[in-house]
Image: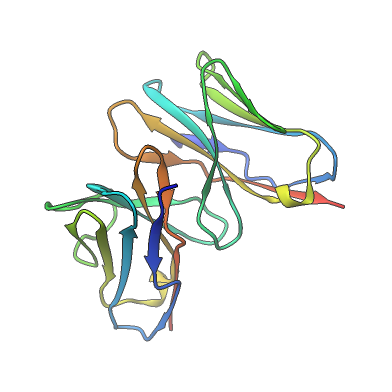
Amino acid sequence: RKEVEQDPGPFNVPEGATVAFNCTYSNSASQSFFWYRQDCRKEPKLLMSVYSSGNEDGRFTAQLNRASQYISLLIRDSKLSDSATYLCVVNVRGAQKLVFGQGTRLTINP
Amino acid sequence: GAVVSQHPSWVICKSGTSVKIECRSLDFQATTMFWYRQFPKQSLMLMATSNEGSKATYEQGVEKDKFLINHASLTLSTLTVTSAHPEDSSFYICSARDEKLFFGSGTQLSVL
């Protein structure tokens, strides 16, 4: 089983729609959680950290469910510019490295 | 914010040659840097953790003699792909941690 698993998609949704995807992690010692965004042939860029209480940044909402070991990302009122691959990233307590999920490809259609 | 600079952006080389990729932290000191490889439509796979002043820690399955890592200063880590072959063609990305993790812009390596 992969340490971090995501549905690779692709997800194709119309502009203005709300879209959500999940990510599951296998290590219960996972401590920090992030969503990164990666455009084709570009470096990943931090979209948002995920906090235990859930957090929101504009149209983006991230949630963490420790009991079920998954995190989610919700995008409201999607824009064409939201088209990208979204990477779920997990850091295990005491470890330096981050573990990346496969990424979920999202395409917003006009 | 913190910036990580990676060069070159693109490399096309002949099979059997060696290629060096540089990763610099521009406005912070990084005792640890990370090197990733990403094949098309796949996730970033950590290759090794580069430690300033000591040997790099390689992930399982990554050949340390083929992927030479040098982290001689607090702002520079280099990855050398030795005797590159077509199967080494990939997107290589470095990262360094300040308070958050920052990535270099990546290097697309194509081995002919």
Residue A61: quarter of image: top right
Q: Is residue A1 visible?
A: no
What percent of the width, then of the height, locates residue B53?
Answer: 12, 53
What percent of the width, then of the height, locates residue B56?
Answer: 19, 52
**Is the C terminus of chain B in the top left, top right, bottom left or bottom right quadrant?**
bottom left
Relative to residue B1, is residue B60 drawn left or right? left
Q: Is residue A41 above or below residue A52?
A: below
Q: Residue at x 48, y 37 (%)?
A: A89
Q: Is residue A53 above or below residue B14?
A: above
Which one is nearer the viewer's eye here, A45 or B75?
B75
Residue B62: quarter of image: bottom left
Which one is nearer the viewer's eye here, A95 or B85?
A95
Rendering colour mode: rainbow
Relative to residue B12, is residue A49 drawn left or right? right
Q: Residue at x 29, y 53 (%)?
A: B61
Q: Residue at x 56, y 63 (%)?
A: A41
Q: Residue at x 26, y 64 (%)?
A: B78
What percent of the width, then of the height, locates residue A65?
Answer: 55, 17
